[in-house]
Amino acid sequence: MKAVIQRVKGAKIFEEERLITEINSGLLVLVGIAKGDGKEDADFLARKIKEIRIFSDKNKKMNLSLEDVDGEVLLVSQFTLLGDAKKGRRPDFTKAESQEKAKEIYDYLVERLKGMNVPTKSGNFGAMIDIHLINSGPVTIILDSR
């Protein structure tokens, strides 16, 4: 399971030009679910998302977690994170999990975060969306559960 974590001052998801959901300060997390990923991968990412210290303290050092700053998470499924563009001109997405299985794991991740008392919002799985965000820093971290 791959995740791109971006520290944001705010982020919004639009579907067909309609606002679906939004967060204030926190993390925008793009998640790609690979074949073979399971609940243990989602558990790993949930812990990392909650505990990663990428928010600045009073000395401007990245020393604070999401919980320390009362931040929110906006979770977005993005199978294109699994794209392999080493050969040819079109990415190969065969490493991505099937939509049905990926949705199951994605939904588990959302519920896991909420169960850890992390304010979490998400859009509609598999929908074509536009994301508006204000990067903070910018700070972007890439995680892989493997």
Image (tube, rainbow, N blue to C red):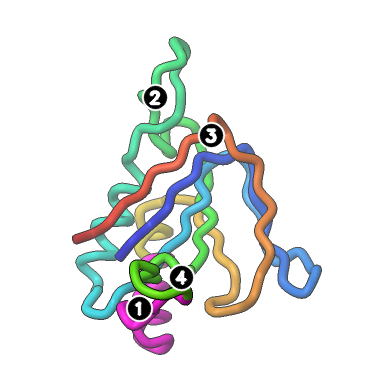
- In the rendered image, residue 42 lying in the magenta stretch gets the answer no
Q: Are marks 1 and 4 in contact (CB under 8 Å)?
A: no
The amino acid type of the residue labelled 2 equals Met
Q: Quadrant of residue 21?
A: bottom right
Tell me which segment is drawn in magenta. 90-110
Q: Is residue 113 positioned above or below 54 on the image?
A: below
Disc 2 or 1, which lies upstream in sequence? 2
Q: Quadrant of residue 46?
A: bottom left
- Tell me the element at label 1: loop
Could you give the CA–CA distance between mark 4 and mark 3, rounded to whole angstroms? Answer: 22 Å
The amino acid type of the residue labelled 1 equals Ala
In the rendered structure, find residue 62 and report the number of the disc placed on it.
2
Q: Nearer the viewer, mark 4 or mark 2?
A: 4
- Tell me the element at label 4: helix
Q: Nearer the viewer, mark 2 or mark 1?
A: 1
Residue of label 3: 138
The N terminus - image quarter: bottom left
Residue count near mark 3 (Cα–Cα under 10 Å), binned few <14, some 14–19, many ≥20:
few
Residue of label 1: 96
Disc 4 or 3, which lies upstream in sequence? 4
Of residue 7 and residue 72, the one placed in the foreground of this image is 7
Q: Is residue 83 positioned above or below 62 on the image?
A: below
Residue of label 4: 80
Could you give the CA–CA distance between mark 1 and mark 3, rounded to whole angstroms? Answer: 28 Å
The amino acid type of the residue labelled 4 equals Thr
What is the x, y in percent for residue 113? 39, 58
The amino acid type of the residue labelled 3 equals Pro
